[in-house]
Image (cartoon, coloured by chain):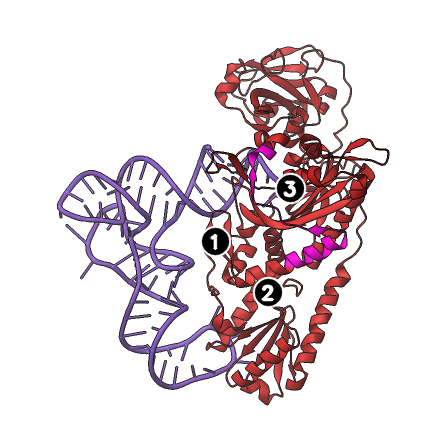
Amino acid sequence: MKMSHMFGNTLRDAPADAEVASHQLLARAGLIRQLGAGIYTLMPMGWRAIGKIEDIMREEINAIGGQEIYMPVVHPADLWKETGRWYKIGGEMSRFHDRKGHDMVLAMTHEEVVADLARREIQSYKQLPRLVYHIQTKWRDDARPRAGLIRVREFTMKDSYSLDADEAGLDKQYRAHYQAYFNIFTRCGVPAVAVASDVGMMGGSMAHEYMYLTPVGEDTLLLCDKCGYRANRQIALFQKPQVQAEDAGELQKVETPNVATIEDLAAFLKVPKARTAKAVFLMATFSEGEREEQKLVFSVVRGDMDVNETKLANALKAKELRPAHPEEIAAIGAVAGYASPVGQNGALVVVDDLITLSPNLVAGANQEGYHYTNVNYGRDYQADIVADIASAEEGSACPKCGSAMRTSRGVEVGNIFKLGTDYTDALGATFLDESGKEQTVIMGSYGIGSGRLLACAAEENHDDKGLIWPISIAPYQVHLLALRGGAEQGEALYADLQAAGLEVLFDDRDESPGIKFNDADLIGLPIRLTVSERSMKEGGVEFKLRHEDEKRIVALEDVVAQVLAAKEALLAEIAKKVVTVPFEE
RNA sequence: CGGGGUGUAGCGCAGCCUGGCAGCGCACCGCGUUUGGGACGCGGUGGUCGGCGGUUCGAAUCCGCCCACCCCGACCA
C-alpha cells in the first residue's frame, strides 16, 4: 500500500476524549474512528489487523476441529422466548419489530441459534461431537461503553459452540479451547491468564475468563502468588477469618446518636469493625417466564467486609439486583442506618455464612439513634438464606492455601463456558444414543472479541512514540520510507518486497523526513526500511526493527532476503512463546 | 440509571464571567525555498459556535428545555 493513496490520516493530537493508551494510539495512527458511544469504524489498517487476528483464531479453532459457519445478526424473538432469555436479559439486548410486527432481536450471542441448528441437524450419536464457530457482529447495548475498543456496543466476536453426546466429550472440547485460547492470545502478543468466573447470563456449570492484566482493566481479580489460585472478584472465594467462640451475651439496646455508618459505629462503641454487622438493602428482580417479581433483600455481612452482589444474586437466583431506594426500605419499617435483622419481616434476609459463626455482634436496633449489642444469629434472628455473600479483597486468605491474595485489574479478552443442556433442553435438541435412548445434546460456548483483543494488543505493545505491533497481527510487516533521492529505489524495492510475498506499507508521500519517521513510529510496523540518497551513499538501505534502537545498512541486493529472514525470526520468536498451559479448574 | 464534566473548522484549543465583525496552533490547497527525526516564507480554503425555544436593537456569550459524547459508580463480556 502506498501511503499517498491510503484512506485516512495520522493525527498529531489524540482526540480529547481518548484516555487510555490503546484508544489514543489506535486513533492517532488512523486505525479506528468513532461513530458513536461504543461504535467504531475500523479504518484500512485497523481492519487489516483485525483480519490477522481473526485468521489466527481460525487457525487455532480449525486445529481443534472447528467448522466455520455464519449465523445471522437478526433473530426471530421466538427462539429467545423458548430459552427464556427474552425475559431474563434486560436492556442490553436490543429488540425491534419487523414490518409484520413480529418481535425480533439483534444478536448479542448465538447459543439459541446453535441449539436450534442442533435440534434440526443432530439425530444420532454418530453426528457427535461437533464444533461450529463463526466470526460475526454482536450488538450489546452496554450501559457504559468506555476506553476505545476495550468496551464497545457493536463488535465482532469469534464464538464457537461445541456439541457433545456426554460430559466427557464436553470436557474434552472445553479443554481443547482452554489451550487454543492461550495460543491465540500469545500469538496476538497479549499475555493472558485464565481465571475462574461467574457464568452470568450464559448459565451452565463451569466457566473461565481469560484476563489480560492491566490497570486499565475494569474487572478486579484475586490472585494467589503462592498456589496460583485466580478468580474474578465477582466469585472469588476466600477463607473467612477464624472466630473465637464466646458465650452469647444478653441482647442490649444502646444509644448511638448520629452513627449511621460502620466506621462511626465502631469508633463510637470502640469495637473493631469485625464485631459489627453491616446491613445492605438491595432490590432483587426474579423472573419466571414472562412474570417478574421484585423483592427487597436485607443482606448482612460482617462490618469489615462488603457484600458481593454477584454472589448474592447467585445465592438468590435473582435476575437483577440494584440498591434499594430509601422509600422501599422505609416501606418495610426498616430504619436506614440503624436497620436491624432482629425482628425483621417483609424482606428476604440473606446472611453471610461468617455471620452465623460470629457471636455478640453490634447491629442496628431499627430505631433512629440505637443499636443492639450481643446480637447472635439463631437466637435473635433467622435468615431466609445463609450463604457466602462477602467480597474477597486485597489480603483475603486464599481459599486453597490460605496465604494472602493480591488484587489486579484486568480486561476480559475471552471466555469459555460449559453450558451443559440449559439451551438444548429448552429447545429440545436431542439425539439417539448407541442404545437407542433419547439424550439431550450437551453444549459449550467459547468467545473472543476481535476488537477488544486488538485494543489489548495495542495496550500491551507500545511505547511513548507509538504502537509496536507483533508481526503476527501488524497491518503490514514492512514500513518502507523513501526520503530525498530514494524515490526510484523505493519504488523498485516496493515491487520486489511484494513480489517476495511481503506486506509493505510504502511511504512515498512528499513529506519531510521527520514526519515520515514519526508516523512510522506511531503506526509501529515491525520492520522499517529507509531508502534515500544518503542511505545509498552509505551502501544501500537502512534497516531497523521497531522494537530495537539499532539501525544498520543493508546492500540493495540483500534487502529482500534480509527482510524475509527478519520476518521469519520475529514469527519464530512469537511461536516460541506458545506453550502448553496446565488446565486448572 | 445516579454523580461529575465537555460540546466553537478534520484534530487540539481560546473567546463566554462583563452580549457588539468567530479567532489561534496543527492539518488542508497554491507558489517558492527547503529535505535523515513533526522545516520556512507569501497567499488561500474550510464554521448552522450540538439542537430547539426565550430575553434583547443585537446571543457562541444570558435563561429554559432537549440531545450527544467523556469520566466515576451501578451494570455488563
- Residue A444, compared with residue B42, is above or below; it is above
Q: Is residue A323 left or right of residue A342?
A: left
Is A553 situated left or right of A431 in this image? left
Residue under pointer 2: A475
Badge 3 amino acid: Thr
Q: Nearer the viewer, mark 3 or mark 2?
A: 2
Q: Are marks 1 and 2 on the same chain?
A: yes
Rounded to the nearest angstrom, the CA distance separating label 3 from label 1 is 27 Å
Q: Which chain is red?
A: A
Name the colour assigned to chain B in the rendering.
Answer: purple
Q: Tell me, yes or no, whether dots 3 and 1 are on the same chain.
A: yes
Displayed quadrant of residue A436: top right
> Which residue matches tag 3?
A220
Tag 1 subunit: A
Q: Quadrant of the N terminus of chain A?
A: bottom right
Q: Please name the residue shown 83% across and 39% down the image.
A: A168
* Residue A554 screen position, x and y as percent: 66, 83
Label 3: chain?
A
A185 horizontally vs B24: left or right = right
Residue ID at (75%, 45%): A130
Q: Earlier in the sequence, mark 3 or mark 2?
A: 3
Residue at (65% x, 30% y) in the render: A305
Range drawn in magenta:
A53-80
Q: Are marks 1 and 2 in contact (CB under 8 Å)?
A: no
Q: Amino acid at mark 1?
A: Gln
The location of residue A63, given as percent across then percent down, is: 76, 55
Q: Nearer the viewer, residue A286 or A531?
A: A286
Q: Position of residue A479 (x, y in %)?
A: 58, 72
First of labels 3, 1 by sequence position: 1
The residue where tag 1 is placed is: A34
Image position, residue A211 (x, y; %): 67, 47
